[in-house]
Amino acid sequence: MPLLLGSFVRCAFSATLLVLWLVLAGFTCTGSEHTATATLPAAFSDLLPHFLVEPEDEYIVKNKPVTLTCRSTPATQIYFKCNGEWVHQDDHLIERTVDPATALPVMQVTIDITRQQVEKIFGLDEYWCQCVAWSTTGTQKSQKAYIRIAYLRKNFEEEPQGKEVALDQEVLLHCHPPEGVPQAEVEWQRNEDVIDPASDPNFFITTDHNLVIKKARLADTGNYTCVAKNIVARRKSTSATVLVYVDGGWSEWSKWSACGADCSMWRSRECTQPSPGTGGKDCQGLDLQSLNCTSEQCPQTVSGAEDVALYIGMVAVALCLTLLLIVVVLVYRRKKEGLDADVADSSILTTGFQPMGIKPSKPENSHLLTIQPDLTTTTTSYQGTLRSRHDATAKFSMTNGPLLDPLPNGSHTLHNGKLNSDPAEFVSRLSTQTYFKTLPRDVANTSYGTFNFLGGRLTIPNTGISLLIPPEAIPRGKIYEIYLTVQRKEDLRLPLAGCQTLLSPVVSCGPLGVVLSRPVILSMDHCSDACLDNWAVRLKKQNYEGAWEDVLLMGEELVSEPYYCQLEAETCRLFSEQLGTFALVGESLHMGAAKRLRLVLFSDAYCSTLEYNIRVYCMDDTQDVFKEVMQMERQLGGRLIDEPHILLFKDSYHNLRLSIHDMPQAHWRSKLLAGYQEIPFYHIWNGSQRYLHCTFTLERLSLSTCELTCQLCVWQVEGEGQSFSLDFNIAKDTRALDSEFLLMDSNATALAGPSAFQIPYLIRQKICSSLDAPCPNGADWRMLAQRLKLERHMSFFASKASPTSVILDLWEAQHFHSGNINQLATVMADIGKQEAMIFLVSDGEC
C-alpha cells in the first residue's frame, strides 16, 4: 500500500510540473507561431516521439492546394521534408495542445502544397512529403505521402460497339476507360439507367470493365453507355445499341389433306413458334409439303390413250439414256488411250512402271501400292516432272523460277539446267504482269511454283501451311504460276467483335481469279480446342475491295458452296474452288471455350552483368507464330531455356498472371516490385498481338553466381495454370534455337507433278474408277471414307463427280510427310476389291 501511494504521489507531482511548464512555455496559445521547437521537462525527456497523425496521399484537383498534417507526442520539433528538401520554417503552421488522457504535450504541424510545386518535378519523379519529429531522446520519421495532380482524359481507349444478337445469346461489350489519376471507376448504363449486377445477375462486369450479358433477353434491347468517373470529372462513352432479335420457329405439321383430283395430298405449317421479331430471320425450310397418293386413295386413274402416251414417253427416255451411256463409254475409252492430246509423249507418266502381282492376304507387304521407277530416261517433253517421287533429293524446288515453258505444239519441256537461285528475281518478274498485282513481297514466308493439270504442292516450311493442287484441278492446256504466303496479322486487321478471336494465321494464295476445275486444299494450323460445341467457327475471306466476308460457318457447310472445311485437332483443311486470302475466326458460345496458348521461355545467351532477364512468351499455339518468335529471338541473341508448354486459355474474361518463386535468396533476388505480372484478357483473346510476353528481371548478388534454380508459374485467374521448374547454368549456351524445337523442313517448298503425291497418278486413276461406281454391298468410296474416319463428310464427297478422288486428295493433304502407303493398301484390301484390277499396271499400259 505505501508503494502504490508513493507511485500516485510521483505521478501527480509530474503532472503538476508539466502544467507549470506548459504555462511558462506558452503552449496554451494556438496562434500562428513560426517556431516548431520546444523544450520538454525532465520527466518526459526519455520518451521517443510517436505519431498520432501521419500525412496521407493527396490529389490536387485543378488548382486547389492540398494540406498535409502531422501530429506527434511528445516532440520538441516537427518539420516537413518534401522530395528530400526541408520545407521552410515559415511555411509550417503549428498548434500545441495537451492530450487529456495521458497529460503528454501534443504538437501538430500543417503545410500546404500547390500545383506549381508538384509540376516543377514533372517527369522526374513523384512528389512526396514526410514529417520528422524530434525529442531529446531521438527522432522519428512518418510515412511518405505522395501528392499527384488529378486528371481524367476525354477520350476512351476503347468504346462499346453496337451489335445485333439472337435471343439467349451471350453478349460482350468492351470498355477501356480514359487514362486518369486516380484511376477511373466504371459503371454501365442502359437507356441512362445504371446497371447493377447485384440486383440483376444476368449482367456481369469483368475486372477489365467489360459488360457481359449472359443470356440476351428482349428487354435487354437498348442503348448501352460506359461511364468513367474519378474525383476530377465524369466521362461518357458513345452509346452502343444492342438489338436482341428472335428467329422464327416452325409450328407442328398439320394433318395430311384428303387425296385430291391430281392424286396428291398436302400438309402445312406456320412460322409462329415463335414468330420472327426485331429483325430476326424467317423460318427456314418448306411451309407446304405434298405427297403422292396410293392408287387406292386416288379418285381417278390414267387409262386408255393416256396409258399409251405414258409408255411411249418411257421408251423415249430409255433410248436417250442408252445413247448417252454409249457416248460416255466411247469418251472414256478414248481418254484411257492417252491422258491428254497435248502430251507429246504420254508414256512419261508410266515410264519404268513394272508389272507386279499383289496378294490380298498379305496387306502388310511394302509393295502393295509401290511401282518402282526406271531412271534411265533423262530427257523428254511432257506436262509434269521426270523425277521419281521416291527420290527426295531429286525433287524440284520451284521457288526460284518456272519449271515449264510452252512449246509451239502445246507441249512443255523440262529445263535440266541450274535454276535461278534468287527468289526475289522471280517475284519481280511475276509482279510486272498485271494479273499478278496481288503477289506478295515477303519472300521469306512465301513459296511459288509453276503447275499444270498434273497438280502439285506448295509448302511454307515450319509453319504448318501448305497448298495441295490435285491432279485435274488446273484445266488441261493451262499453266499457272501460283504463290502461297502467310500474312503478318498486324498488316491485315480483321474486324473482330464481341467474343470473336483469331484462331489461325492469315494465309493468301493466288493469283486471284484463276479458273479451277476442282477444289484445292489449303492446310493451316488453328489454336482452338477443336470442340464445335464451344465455338462458332467462321471462315473469312478478303474480297477484291479488301473487306472481309463470312463465307462459311463450320458445321453448317453447304455442299453447293465453293468452300468446305475439315477441322482436325490442330489443323484446318479448307477445300476451295477459289484462291484468295483466308482466316479462321472463332466466337465462343460460352465460357467453356478455350484457346491453346504456347508458353515459351527465353533468356540472354550471354550475361556479363548482375542483372539477368527471363522472357516468357504467351502466343497462339500455331507453328507460324512460333517460327517468327524463334527468328526474332535468334536476332536478339536469345537462348531457349525450357521446352514449350501448352496452356488452355478460357473465355472467362480473367487475365493471365505470371510469377517467379523459390529462388535461392543467398544468390538471387527478383527486381519485380509486385508479386506477379499480368497480361490483360482481351490482349490475349483478340489474337492480333503476336509477341505478347513478360520479362522478369533478376539480380545475382555476385558475378561468380551462374547456377539458377527457380519456379515460374503461369495461370489464368480462376483457370488452368502451368509451372516451370528451371535449373540451368546462365554461363553455358547449350541449346541452339534451330536444332531441337524448330525442326527445319528439308522438303522442297514447291513440288510439281507426280513427285508431289504419295499415290502414283495411274494407280490413283484406277482406284477412282473402281470405287466411284456405287456397289450394292457398300464396297465403294463410302467404305473408303469410313475406314479413313471421314464419314462426317459423306454428303460433301457425294456432291463431287469423283468422290474417291476428293477422298484421296484429303488423304494426300493429311499424310504427305507421314503417309503410310501400305496402310492405304490395307484399307483397299479390306474393302474387298481385286487388287490386281486396281493396282496392277500392265506392260501394254507402260
Image: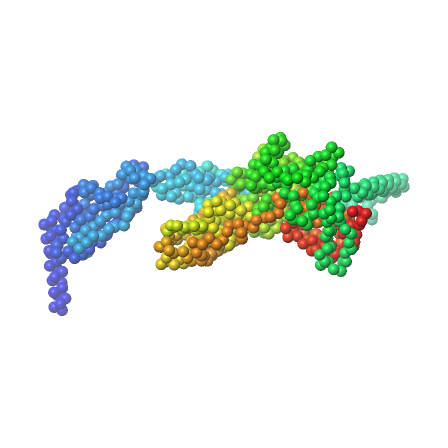
The spot of residue 127 in percent (x, y) is: 29, 43
The figure's colour scheme reads: rainbow
The spot of residue 663 in percent (x, y) is: 40, 57
- The residue at the point 80 percent across, 49 percent down is 843
Quarter location, residue 660: bottom left
The spot of residue 160 in percent (x, y) is: 48, 40
Residue 250 visible here: no
Residue 707 visible here: yes
- The residue at the point 35 percent across, 55 percent down is 701
Query: Nearest the camera: 215 or 319?
Result: 319
The spot of residue 299 in percent (x, y) is: 82, 44
Q: The N terminus appears in which quarter of the rendering?
A: bottom left
- The residue at the point 20 percent across, 43 percent down is 92
Q: Is residue 138 above or below residue 288?
A: below
Q: Is residue 484 above or below residue 529?
A: above
Query: Nearest the camera: 764 or 768?
Result: 764
- The residue at the point 18 percent across, 49 percent down is 77
**Residue most toward the bottom?**
1
Quarter location, residue 453: top right
Q: How many marks?
A: 0
Query: Nearest the camera: 568 or 640?
Result: 640
Quarter location, residue 147: top left
Q: Is residue 803 left or right of residue 613?
A: right
Q: Is residue 353 left or right of residue 242?
A: right
